[in-house]
Image (cartoon, grey):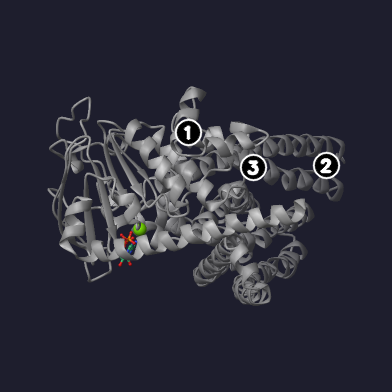
């Protein structure tokens, strides 16, 4: 059963749980004493031989009920606390586990699905400890205590009364088994609702821009009705349990009335015992009505546990296997030796036998069409994709021998799609080390070409950029992420097309500043502009995963290949753009004249 896997999480609280369970059992025993006291009272009334005595039993019953109530409240509170602690541990574990996962993991689990597992499925586990476990103990020990005292009173009548119990147990077990797939489907459908909502909110601007709101509402309705169908199915299988079990337990009073009544008439049983049996039957029947509910909770928790462990069982693809001696300071030599890499599930390699050597302090540009493997190459250097051992070396040491943390400190990647946290600009720039001096942040912002923009904001560095950096333009976001990379001052800087939304003049300015700032340190940058690449010591043109051309700007122009053709097209565009700018300026002058006169 899937719930078994939760064992280690409960072991920490084993003694507390045992204590609370024992307390619950005690409440059952106290409960079971009540009918005995009733019997004493009633018999004293019915039997002329015994002096009537109801005061003492009544007082004792009151005392018992009070004690039982107190103990029960405390025990249940403890159970709930354990439930909260266990779910806290589970959530922490899941969150920590997700942090280290690679691309394949996030391909398998969508964000919404993960959120649903971490919130809804863990919630099911909490419910089981808080409620269902308490109910189950109550159920089992009520029956046990009831049986014990009933056998003491009349073994034969007990036998008849408990006849339905095995039937109830077996039926309950079978019903729980048929409930499981329904609950699993229900939780999956709920995850679909979460995923859908999450993706919708992420893409809300695209949806609105394309006027697809109605279509989205339609799709949401489909996802929701699927969930409703699944929830209904789960509820129906639960309703079956909640109906069938009490129905079976309703047989007991009939048996008591007929057979017990016969025994009383025969003089083989006192009226007090007869009444006590009724009280016991009622006592046993009460938790049976709850059993259906508890069983369904257990089933839901089992389904939830299965889904939680699907995540926890997923081994991170990229694991630390540091073995080599890592020098304290990294000079910044990057060697890629015959690297071939295919994404899992694809047949064509994204990188095909690429060899590149970058000496410390060099700046290298990678150029090429969309999809030729540029990003993949930079990702490989920081092991965001898992490349084979023996293909990439930093300072002569295989990157697989670096602890991941060290590797990613030595080489800082500024990714292609800029991401900012919903925090202030300062917090975003100093993300990896909040204790950094603000002057360092300004230096990085200056170098990244963002300083002027920040000064324009009324709150400066303290400006909060909304969720996903909503308040910044695309180019501003790119420059912010560039500055965040620069502030780390790493020996190796990997820039993945960070100038695509920045105009050529700004780019030129940033690059010349960068050249000064990164003096003596290694930089690999991706660009689709010749004007960016020309500043590099060497340029590699990638095509379909291969290096097609390489050399300096002049060498590549002389070669007359792809790079030369690209240069011709782009400088044409430059000239064209410059001409347009001039025309616009002239227009401004003309307009100013017209307004002035
Ligand atoms: N996570 C991924 N899974 C499968 N294929 C991918 C993945 N990322 C990129 N690719 C494929 O690998 C190739 C190279 O992609 P990429 O390195 O991003 O290109 P570039 O950065 O040059 O535009 C492309 O054909 C792309 O479709
Ligand atoms: Mg790319």
Distance (Cα) linking label 2 and label 1 = 101 Å
Mark 2: which secondary structure?
loop
Q: Give me the residue at 37% from left, 41% from top.
A: 511
Q: Label 1 CB, ligand 2: below 8 Å?
A: no
Residue tagged 1: 446
Q: Position of residue 26 (x, y in %)?
A: 62, 39
Q: Position of residue 236 (x, y in %)?
A: 64, 74
Q: Give me the residue at 23% from left, 61% from top.
A: 542
Distance (Cα) linking label 2 and label 3 = 27 Å
Q: Give me the residue at 60% from left, 75% from top.
A: 226
Mark 1: which secondary structure?
helix
Question: Is residue 286 found left or right of 547 in the rendered image?
Answer: right
Residue tagged 3: 29
Q: Earlier in the sequence, mark 1 or mark 3?
A: 3
The answer to whether any part of residue 516 appears in the image is yes
Instruction: Tell which of 573 and 327 is nearer to you.
Output: 573
Instruction: Tell which of 407 and 508 is nearer to you.
Output: 508
Question: Is residue 186 found left or right of 262 in the rendered image?
Answer: left
Q: Earlier in the sequence, mark 2 or mark 1?
A: 2
| Nearer the camera: disc 2 or disc 3 | 3
Other residues around mark 2 within 10 Å, as few (<14) / some (14–19) / many (≥20): few
Corner quadrant of residue 261: bottom right
Q: Label 2 CB, ligand 1: below 8 Å?
A: no
Ligand 1 falls in quadrant: bottom left
Q: Give me the residue at 23% from left, 71% from top.
A: 347
Which of the labelled discs sits on residue 105, or is there none? none
């Amino acid at each position: 059963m899937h719930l078994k896997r939760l064992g280690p999480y409960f072991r920490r609280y084993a003694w507390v749980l045992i204590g609370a369970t024992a307390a619950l059992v005690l409440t059952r025993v106290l409960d079971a004493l009540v009918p005995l006291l009733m019997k004493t009272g009633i018999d004293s009334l019915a039997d002329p031989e015994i002096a009537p005595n109801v005061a003492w039993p009544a007082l004792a019953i009151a005392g018992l009920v009070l004690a039982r109530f107190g103990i029960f409240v405390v025990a249940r509170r403890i159970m709930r606390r354990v439930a909260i602690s266990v779910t806290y541990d589970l959530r922490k574990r899941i969150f920590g586990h997700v942090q280290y996962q690679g691309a394949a993991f996030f391909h398998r689990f969508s964000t919404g699905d993960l959120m649903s597992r971490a919130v809804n499925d863990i919630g099911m586990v909490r419910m089981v400890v808080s409620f269902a476990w308490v109910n189950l103990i109550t159920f089992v020990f009520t029956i046990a205590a009831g049986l014990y005292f009933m056998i003491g009173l009349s073994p034969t009548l007990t036998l008849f009364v408990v006849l339905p119990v095995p039937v109830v147990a077996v039926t309950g077990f079978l019903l729980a088994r048929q409930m499981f797939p329904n609950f699993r489907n229900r939780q999956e459908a709920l995850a679909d609702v979460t995923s859908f909502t999450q993706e919708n909110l992420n893409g809300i601007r695209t949806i609105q821009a394309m006027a697809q709101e109605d279509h989205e509402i339609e799709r949401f309705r489909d996802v929701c009705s699927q969930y409703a169908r699944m929830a209904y199915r789960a509820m129906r299988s639960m309703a079956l349990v909640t109906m069938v079990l009490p129905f079976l337990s309703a047989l007991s009073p009939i048996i008591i009335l007929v057979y017990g009544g016969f025994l009383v008439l025969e003089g083989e049983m006192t009226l007090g015992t007869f009444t006590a049996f009724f009280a016991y039957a009622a006592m046993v029947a009460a938790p049976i009505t709850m059993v259906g509910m508890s069983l369904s909770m257990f089933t839901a928790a089992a389904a939830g546990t299965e889904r939680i462990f699907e995540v926890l069982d997923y081994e991170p693809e990229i694991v630390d296997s540091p073995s080599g001696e890592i020098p304290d300071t990294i000079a910044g030599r990057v060697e890629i030796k015959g690297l071939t890499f295919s994404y899992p599930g694809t047949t064509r390699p994204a990188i095909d036998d690429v060899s590149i050597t970058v000496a410390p302090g060099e700046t290298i540009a990678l150029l090429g069409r969309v999809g030729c493997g540029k990003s993949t190459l930079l990702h490989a250097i920081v092991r965001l994709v898992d490349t084979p051992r023996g293909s990439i070396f930093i300072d002569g040491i295989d990157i697989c021998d670096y602890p991941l943390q060290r590797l990613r400190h030595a080489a800082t990647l500024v990714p292609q799609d800029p991401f900012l946290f919903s925090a202030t600009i300062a917090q975003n720039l100093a993300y990896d080390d909040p204790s950094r001096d603000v002057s360092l942040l300004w230096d990085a912002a200056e170098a990244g070409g963002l300083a002027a923009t920040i000064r324009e904001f009324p709150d400066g560095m303290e400006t909060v950029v909304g969720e996903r950096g909503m308040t910044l333009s695309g180019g501003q976001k790119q420059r912010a992420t560039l500055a965040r990379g620069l502030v780390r001052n790493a020996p190796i800087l990997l820039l993945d097309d960070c100038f695509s939304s920045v105009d050529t003049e700004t780019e030129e300015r940033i690059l010349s500043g960068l050249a000064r700032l990164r003096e003596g340190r290694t930089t690999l940058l991706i660009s689709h502009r010749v004007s960016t690449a020309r500043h590099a010591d060497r340029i590699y043109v990638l095509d379909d995963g291969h290096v097609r051309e390489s050399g300096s700007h002049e060498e590549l122009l002389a070669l007359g290949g792809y790079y030369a053709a690209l240069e011709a097209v782009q400088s044409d565009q430059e000239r064209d753009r410059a001409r347009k700018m001039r025309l616009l300026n002239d227009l401004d002058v003309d307009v100013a004249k017209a307004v002035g006169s």
